[in-house]
Image (cartoon, rainbow, N blue to C red):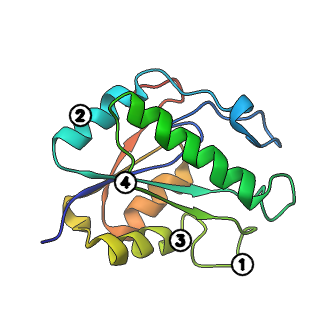
Amino acid sequence: MSRPCVFLDRDGVINEKAPPGEYIRNWKEFRFLPNVSDWIRIFNALGYLVIVVTNQRGIARGMVSQADTDELHSKMVRELSERGARIDDIFLCPHEEDTCNCRKPRPGLVLQAREKWDIDLGRSLMIGDSARDEALAAACGIRFLRADGAGRLV
């Protein structure tokens, strides 16, 4: 049976964004935003899958490696789990702009997740902090909630 999902952007939703032109390269640079584990726990309790969909073009630019990004994501998931908040999966686009179908706002990441997890997009939502995230939600026919970059949903 299909399940609803909350799709989360990473930078600016789960963690503080890096300064413009920079990237979160490792766990030492990663800072959770306040309240994020609280509202992930709520979505978990309501039966939603929680899946991160994130553009990480720093990989294509050689600013951060795929291995370092994978390690950071493993630590992020583990830390949230220790706080009682479950992330079910992470889908990322490592490419430069306009070279693939997976770079937000294109729908590739959400469609990959839907295929893997049997997600009901009609009952799902996207939480993001940017116009790209909002456009992704519109492209996939899912509701959108804006995060303010300080750990609040507005």
In the rendered image, the residue lying farthest to the left is: 1
Mark 1 lies on residue: 99
Q: Residue at x 50, y 53 (%)?
A: 133
First in sequence, mark 2 or 3: give its number.
Answer: 2
| Residue 109 position within the rendered picture, expressed as x and y whole percent measured from the top left | 49, 69
Q: Which mark is residue 88?
A: 4
Look at the numbered disc 4 and give the secondary structure of its residue.
Answer: loop
Task: Report how far apart the C-alphas of labels 3 and 1 lie in the structure.
Answer: 11 Å
| Residue 107 position within the rendered picture, expressed as x and y whole percent measured from the top left | 47, 72
Look at the numbered disc 2 and give the secondary structure of its residue.
Answer: helix
Identify the amino acid type marked 1.
Thr
Q: Which mark is residue 42?
A: 2
Q: Quadrant of the C terminus?
A: top left
Look at the numbered disc 1 and give the secondary structure of its residue.
Answer: loop
Say which of marks 1 and 4 sits in front.
4
Identify the amino acid type marked 2.
Ile
First in sequence, mark 3 or 4: give its number.
Answer: 4
Q: In the rendered view, would you say 46 is above or below 80? A: below
